[in-house]
Image (tube, rainbow, N blue to C red):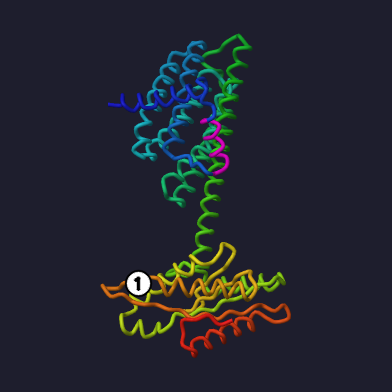
Amino acid sequence: MYNKYYLYYFKNVCYTINILIGGERGKLISAVSGIINGTVKISDRKKYSTITVAIACVHMLLILIFRTIGSVPMTIYNVCSVVGYLMCLPLIRRNALSWVFAYICVEVPLHSFLAIYTAGWNYGFAMYLIAIVPVGFDMSFALKNPVRGIKISMIFGLFSFVTFISCRMFSYYNMPLYSVDNEFFVQIVFFFNMLCTFLLLLVYSFIFASEINVAQTVLRKKNSELANLASKDALTGFYNRRKMHEYLVCAAEGKEVFSLIMSDIDNFKKLNDTYGHDCGDEALKAVSDACRSCISDGDRICRWGGEEFLILTNRPLNAAADTAEKIRSAVEHCNLTFNGIDIKITMTLGVSEFDPSSTIDKVITAADQKLYIGKNSGKNRVVK
């Protein structure tokens, strides 16, 4: 029943080899760069599948080592371990990580102890107890229960430490069942176990660092989205009054020429009373689109009040008045149909230029006063 899962992972291994050998190194480099930069997230399924296959491969090499040592029981044990790790692959695909974690917690300490009991301490089999500690921490947190994960990880780490010390004490007072006179072979096996330990720690450190980068990237993106939401009006998409004040302060500190355009939808209260607030919202959206189409990229526009809009533009008074006239004309010619009724919308705008010897409040007041001059003069006009 597991054939299809093994075939799937075999194809993945072949594809990886093809990338390394077949001239597709660019894809691998791109993937690794994405992981390092935090733009590519390693899924738990891929991560634990890769680690599981890697551990199975180590046990396959250990089969040859214990055959050379002459230990048939440990050779059989490692064969069973390989089968056990391969059987973990479909469990990982089903996200049954608790069973995989339990298997690793039992298999690695047991293997280390039996290996030392069989061959002795000098081969370095106990080093896997060190390498597996971060794996245990990581897998326990994948159980989606942080508090429980910390407890389980600490228990597993303490158990690995106790097993490590026990193995050392056992080897100190007891001779191994099998011995090899070839010291060079012993050193080769020690180097192999040390290399596997460091590679596992290195890979997990790399994965940990990449996951931190991913988390930071996501956090920065979320913070940017929240900051954007906090600075924008939900209905129109324009800046809110608080954010606009920041831009106004910066513009005033820059001592550059700029102007303000204060605008107000004519007869907006009557429109709300006659057709309802839903119609008022549609009118605000229509006016917003018209305003947006008339301002340049460097201009700032905000929803100053209910139906009032304030525009900050880096233009002198006359050029700002030309922009205001474009907005007035665009609003006048925009089409708004609500419940089958064509509704005409107009807007009155007041324009004022910033004087470096003045203040932001005064230039806003000046634009507001000109707006009301336009209101009192018949509406649907620009006053500068």
Query: Which quarter of the image is occupied by the C terminus?
Result: bottom right
Residue at 53 percent of width and 67 percent of height: 295
Query: Which quarter of the image is occupied by the N terminus?
Result: top left
User: Residue 36: within the magenta?
Assistant: yes
Given residues 121 and 370, the one toward you in this image is 370
**Neighbour tally class for label 1: few under 14, some 14-19, many 20 plus, Cα within 10 Å:** some
Position of residue 235 in the picture relative to residue 316 (left or right): left
The mark total stands at 1
Q: Which residue is mark 1?
A: 336
Q: Quadrant of residue 127?
A: top right
Classify 374 as above or below 127: below
Given residues 201 and 335, the one toward you in this image is 335
Residue at 42 percent of width and 75 percent of height: 332
Given residues 231 and 211, the one toward you in this image is 231
Instruction: Name, please, the residue furthest toward the top.
Output: 181
Which SS class for mark 1?
Answer: strand
Position of residue 1 in the picture relative to residue 175 (left or right): left
**Percent from the top left, x then y, of residue 280?**
37, 77
Q: Residue type at mark 1?
A: Leu
Q: Does residue 306 show up?
A: no
**Percent from the top left, x then y, of residue 69?**
52, 12
Predominant secondary structure in magenta? Answer: helix
* Residue bounds of the magenta highlight: 27-38
Position of residue 318 in the picture relative to residue 287 (left or right): right
**Percent from the top left, x then y, of residue 341?**
28, 75
Q: Does residue 87 show up?
A: yes
